[in-house]
Amino acid sequence: MSPIFLVFLSMFAVFLLLTLAAAVRWVWHVIRHSSSGAASGTELGGPSTVSDVLLLVGVATAWYSVAGGWAVQLIIYPIYADFAPLGPEAFHAFSIGYSSRLPIPLLPIGVMCLAWVLLLWFPSRYVPQRTVWAIVGLCVAHIAVTPFAAIAQDQMRNHGFSESLYAQLMWSNGVRSVIFTLIGLLSLVAVRSRWTTRSNYEPGA
């Protein structure tokens, strides 16, 4: 396993730990304030350069992921089926070449997940936390479905093309592509909330 891929997996591990910690903190907040009704899914923070940078990084990497997910779904993975009739050697060479170059393009996806979960810890006053939580939840869903695609890729790389594994690869990555698209759309909602709300209440800011 390449060092870059280990970094990618470490990003996901940190993301999941931060998500779990944020969820525990939120539950504790709800319990403490249940009698006063102060807890809310729309809890807002203060203006911060850190939160603004995280938001912009989250939006940029979200749309990178949208483009990458659909490019793989519509262009790259169909080549698996195109190579299959050429024989196991050609298919194996293509599969190995693709897998060896995969870790670097995956890194922005890890950055995306980390940026959004950090917005739970460094919230922006103008971005509702329910929007950030929705994106973080979709990132968790992406991680949950990724093993189906990874297993299909690994088995075909090691044992050759399989129609059933190819179908598994296509549907699982299709789900991921839809998840990325939802994250991208919600990221635009977050940006709109951040700057439109600020411009409405702080003219000239």
Image (spheres, rainbow, N blue to C red):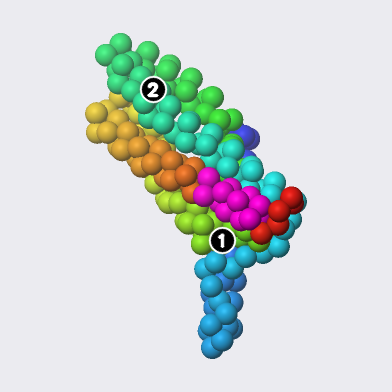
Q: Is residue 176 above or below residue 105?
A: below
Residue carrying label 2: 75
Mark 2: few/some/many CA within 10 Å (<14, 14-19, 20+): few
Magenta range is 187-200
Which residue carries the number 1 mark?
128
Residue closer to the observer: 20 or 35: 35
Marks 1 and 2 sit apart, C-alpha to C-alpha, by 36 Å
Q: Residue at x 42, y 18 (%)?
A: 94
| Residue 49 counted in the magenta span | no
The numbered disc on residue 205 is none
Where, by quadrant of the figure, is residue 43 drawn? bottom right
Instruction: Give amino acid for label 1.
Output: Pro
| Image position of 82 (left or right of 150) | left
The one nearer the camera, 85 or 131, is 131
Instruction: Answer above or below: position of 91 versus 129.
Output: above
25 over 14 or under it: above or below: below
Q: Is residue 151 visible?
A: no
